[in-house]
Each structure stands twice: as C-alpha cells, then as structure tokens.
Image (spheres, helix red, strand yellow):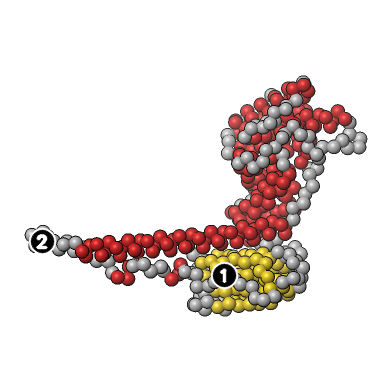
Amino acid sequence: MTVQALRERRIDTLAVLLDTYGREIQGVAYLILRDRALAEDVTIETLLTAFERGGSIRVEAAVRPWLLRVAANKALTVRRSGARVIHLDVVPDTLRVREGDLAGETSDRVAILQAVGALPIQMRAAVVLRYYADLPVEGVAAALGKSPNTIKAQLQTALARLRRTLSDPAMAPGETSHA
Amino acid sequence: MHDDLLERRLGAALHSDADGLPFTITAAEIERRMALRRRSLAGRRLTMLFAAAVGISLVGIGGALSGLFNRSLPTPSETVAPTPAPRPTATAAVTVPPSLRPPLGPLEAPPGWTISGSVGPEFALETHVVSVTGAGVGEDHVLVVLSCTGTEPIEVTVEDGKPIGSHTQTFQAACKPDGNTTTETVKVTEQGVGVRYVAPKGAWTVLGILVPSS
C-alpha cells in the first residue's frame, strides 16, 4: 500500500505516510534532539524526502527502516549544525507521575532519560534506534552508516553508563551532550 | 554482556517519553512545505538556466574576439607551409539559444484573484510530472491557469476531496509554439487542492492555482 503510493507519487501519499509512520519518526527525532519543535521539523522533512525519493523502494518491509534511517540522519545533521543549545538536565515535560505510578518508577525513568540525554549524539542515536524503534543491530548499523561491531560497542558502553547511573544515583549526569 | 532487565527499562523509558508527545503535524502542513520547496526549486532552476545562458554568451564572445584577433595577425610567409585555421563564423557570436530564454512570463493574478500556488516558468529538459498544491482557503472554486509552449495539448488533473486526491477532474490546455494560456474555473469540495500535469520535453510551462481574493 505504502510502496505503491510512493511509486505512484499520488497526492495522498503524504497522508498515508503521516498516518502510518509519522508518530514514530517524531519519537525518534525527539529522543535524539530532545526538542519537540526540531523533531516536528525533522518529521516533515523526512516525509517530504520519502515522497520525493521513496519511489525506488520495492518492498513494503523496507519502508519503515528506510524512513527511520532518513529521520535519524536528518536529526543528527540538525544537531551537528548546532541549531539550538539544549539543556539535557531538564526533566522532560511529558514525564509526569501518572495515577497509580510508583514514585520510584518515575524517578527511575527520569534517571534513565537523563543518562540517555547525556550520551554522545551518535551513541544516543544508536540507543534510540535499537531500544525505541526496535531495529536490529544490523539495521541500526545500516541506518547510521557504521559497522555492526561499532554499534554493538556503542550500545554496550551506553548500557554500562546507564547501569552505573542507576546503581549510584549520585552519579546522575549533569553534563550536556556533545556532537 | 546482556542485561535484559536494563534493556527493557530503557525501552519503556524511551517509549514513555516519546509516545507521550502530542502529535500535531497534518498532511496539509506538509503539502504547504512541499509547495514552498517547489517554488524555491523553480527559482533555483531559473537561476541555473540564466547562469548557463550567461556562460554560453561568454563563450560566444570569447570565440568572436579570438576570431577578430586571428584576422589581425600577419599572414604567414610563403616559405612556411600554410596551415588553414578554421575561421569562426559571424553567427558564433553572442546569441543565447532561444530555448534558454523563457518565452512565458511569471504568473500574474487577475483582479479579484490571489495566487495560492504556482510553479514556473520552467523548461522541461525531460518529460516529467509537475505538481502544485494550493493552500486551504475555504472557497468552493479555484482558477487553474496553465501557460505552455509546444504543439501538443497538455492534460491537467485537479485533485481535491478528503483525503486530497480522492476526487479528480481533468481539462486540456492547448499549447502553441510561442505560448498559450488556458484558464479553467474548477469547482472544489475541500480546502486543499492539488494540480498536476506532464510537462513534455522541450516545453516551457507556468502553472498557477488562484483563489478569490478575500
């Protein structure tokens, strides 16, 4: 359905892409950039790129990884261009204690997100694509143009840092990420 | 070393953060961005064509000047074997190929109408699809204007409906070698409207979507 729409470049293609993949693309961009406005911008640019260049995709299953790859790379480009200074030690406003939520659970999530936010940008992109978008290591490697071994090493380092942060809250990251 | 519990906690934290974001992007907003991008792309193309025309002119001027210079050189003595040099013809001078000069002007809105989306004048180096979207205006009819050079008519497809593209109408725009403009009033049912056509190779086209001025 999506492949056919992309190939024919029908005018409703954008609506189809938006409905099917928009939210996830925005999630990936937001988790890499930690900025909602920039994430929306990346989402729109990703869908436009798909509309203009996605006609060569022949297999439905290839659409999602391709879109996530485009989104991650656009987000990294935005971040590298230094579009905005982001203070990563600010707790995201979407993280509120919900009814029935244990305070401990929430603080755990906050600590994890802060630790992820403090990771170097490339490593953060790998973590987001692996643990949010659920791409396999090979898929993450293809998306970021690295070897699977490099991605495995980055993910292990990221998990080790998270483990240290969670086992010793005093080590909660206060640093900002660097591109 | 695998730590499934940590990986699960990480995944859950990322989902709780990103999935809670409001999602406010609409297809209309993306279409608007696409129309803007196309307009700036058309401008860039025109600039490149102009630059190419200037380049060709400079080459022509260079050729003409070198021809003059060669003519003023002394003729070789009879002892030297004459080597005939190609003499530049007078027509190699500063003319710009007519196909690089837009024979069509940019779209101008008639009184009482406002341009909602337009593209061109652009020259089709290859046959390709051109599409333009008009921003939502809440009107029940729009003017679609196509100017074109060439000899074959161009079929113009107007798409609207919800989702956009679910309702289509077509009309034929006649083209003439020195340019012809076809204006069609189209009844639309929704706020967004898209227009597309196939620009034939070697033709100049200008397309516009106009809405009544408020």
Label 1: chain letter? B
Quadrant containing the N terminus of chain A in the rendered view: bottom right
Against B212, residue A144 (above or below) is above
Can residue A151 be seen at all in this image of the molecule? yes
Q: Amino acid at mark 2?
A: Ser
Residue A7 makes an appearance in the image: no
Asked which quadrant contains residue B183, the reply is bottom right
Residue under label 2 = B77
The amino acid on which the numbered mark 1 sits, given as a three-letter code, is: Pro
Q: Secondary structure at mark 1?
A: loop
Among numbered discs 2 and 1, the one appearing first in the sequence: 2
Residue at point 68% right, 51% down? A44
Instruction: Determine whether the residue tagged by mark 2 lies in a helix, strand or loop.
Output: loop
A149 or B96: nearer the viewer? B96
Look at 68% across and 59% down and name the residue there.
B32
Left or right relative to A152: residue B3: right
Question: In the drawing, does residue B88 fall left or right of residue A104?
Answer: left
- Residue that label 1 marks: B106
Query: In the image, residue B98 lies at what x, y percent?
Result: 43, 71
Quadrant, the C terminus of chain A: top right
Q: Chain of mark 2?
A: B
The residue located at (26%, 64%) in the rendering is: B67
